[in-house]
Image (cartoon, rainbow, N blue to C red):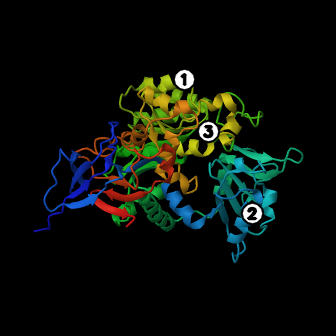
Amino acid sequence: MGMIEQDIVIKGGTLIDGTGAPSISDSIIVISGTKIAKVGSLEEVDVPKNAKIIDATGKTVIPSFIDSHTHFILMGIRTQTTVDLSKTKSISEVLNQVKKQMINLRKGTWVTGHGWDESGWKDKRYPTKDDLDKVSQENPIILTPYYGHLMIVNTPALILAKITNKTPNPPGGKIDRDPGTNEATGILREEAMELIEAVKPTTTKEECLTGIKKACEIALRWGCASVHDMGSKALDISAYQTALENGFLKVRAYVMPDAQFTETMLDGLKVLGVKTRFGDEFLRLGAIKMYIDGSMGSRTAMFSDPYADDPSTCGLFTITPEVLEKRVIKAHKLGMQVCIHAIGDKGIDMALNAIEAALKQEPRMNHRHRIEHCEVVTEEQIKKIKRLGIIPSMQPNFIGEWGQPGGMYEQRLGQNRLKLCNPFKKLLDEGIRVAFGSDCGYCPPWPFNPIYGLWAAINHPIKESRISLVDAVKCYTVNGAYASFEEDLKGSIEPGKLADITILTEDLVSISPEDIKDVKVEMAIINGKVHWSIY
């Protein structure tokens, strides 16, 4: 006979259960096996005999975080192989960091760096090819800002990609050029980046597997039990399957295939009859990821009006409305969820129109189509999001980092449009299910921290958009589960659900909202077992 598993009891903490209900003081949670058995106050629930007791007095107990927008494998890879530029305060500091990385590198070896934010620099400009050529004209260099959608390369990289002053802009992309000579400056936006991707060394499956291991370590440290991995390629999906088979996929993954091989993949799924949700509790096929525009940082997010700090542009569409609509309709008819990257108001309009067209051709109530980021949203768009049943998948850490007075959002948008940026409260007040995530992988490790995200949503720089602690937890838990069709399985602390539970070091209800960002994770429980602890 096998050994009977010992029940676990979490006793004495402040419970925020993820459902939107008020917090409970001196709570008690009984875990039996992989599931939650009982939940209530100390007066309501008896402690089973011989149970293992976890004392949560003075702490907060919540459902494990669900990060609804990650680049999970990429994050794991980048933390080990990429120069971290997140703390640089000038172009010269960027160049110095890259120089340090290049000591003892062989000629021809590619160098990558990631994570700068020029909006706070005195330089107030992107680095260029000329800057990077001062570091090396023998090693190809690729640098990317932490908002993505733009890369800076040096002359060796341009030569390998055969980018000259005669190379045309690819559809959905832009090669920045010197206005006098027409020479490429080394700044490539959106689909133009694929010209470099085509010639740089490809990622191996072994690197993906190492990335999964590292990313799981980071997720557990932040009390996150589930991730929605955006833009996964075939190799990523294969790596996830191997990680699951070999027992080192420690968090639950909802994998979103990338639009770049959407047509081929959709045809294959049609033959197989496989739809969104195929898989098990640890690995599922998610939505089809599609892109419309870029990012505000790279000035490629698509707006109706020009950028406040560059009136020459309104952004850049990465796909035509016709192609997007065709692709969305095809995925929708196959029973696939779609998630569409759209940041600017004009991009969001395009996403809404494509989803509406699909629903007209084949009405379906429970489609749960998503708009990723959905950052600058008008009142009319909010009404349409509600009417169509769309899930905005948003990143509160962005407004925390860029939404402060004088920050990147204000620089790009100006004062009037800034008021429309990440309107969490307006969306929730309409009964719209908002799911929170980090966009980690394209950003340095700090944005993965969901506690920072809670802090940012509660202390939104625009007071009218601030939400409560209870609502912020809900967006990071059960709403994320809803966004992957799994709200009956996880995302809240209720009897019968999976025992994915996080304990925080402080009582969030009793501390100042401004201090929430300094709180740490004390323990991460997944499937009824302690997977990480500060002890």
Q: Secondary structure at mark 1?
A: helix
Residue 293 numbered tag: 3
Residue 17 location (% of width, % of height): 32, 43
Q: Is residue 197 above or below residue 109?
A: above
Q: Earlier in the sequence, mark 1 or mark 2?
A: 2
> What amino acid does circle 2 point to?
Leu
Indicate left or right for 206 with 106 as reference.
left
Along the line of sight, the residue nearer the viewer: 267 or 117: 117
Q: Amino acid at mark 3?
A: Asp
Q: Is residue 453 left or right of residue 32?
A: right
Mark 1 lies on residue: 379
Q: Secondary structure at mark 2?
A: helix
- Kind of residue sitting beneath label 1: Glu
Disc 1 crowd, CA 10 A, few/some/many (<14, 14-19, 20+): few
Quadrant of the image containing the C terminus: bottom left
Of the numbered discs 3 and 1, the one sitting upstream in the chain is: 3
Q: Nearer the viewer, residue 305 or 19?
A: 19
On the image, numbered disc 2 is attached to which residue?
Answer: 95
Please, which residue is most extreme toward the left here? 1
User: In whole angstroms, how far apart are the C-alphas of marks 3 and 2?
Assistant: 29 Å
Tag shown at residue 122: none
| Identity of the residue drawn at 69% across and 46% down | 189
Q: CA distance from mark 3 to mark 1?
A: 20 Å
Residue 451 location in percent, x, y?
47, 50
Would you say residue 260 is visible in this rendering? Answer: yes
Residue 136 locus on image (x, y percent): 77, 67
Q: Residue 194, relative to residue 355: is it above or below?
A: below
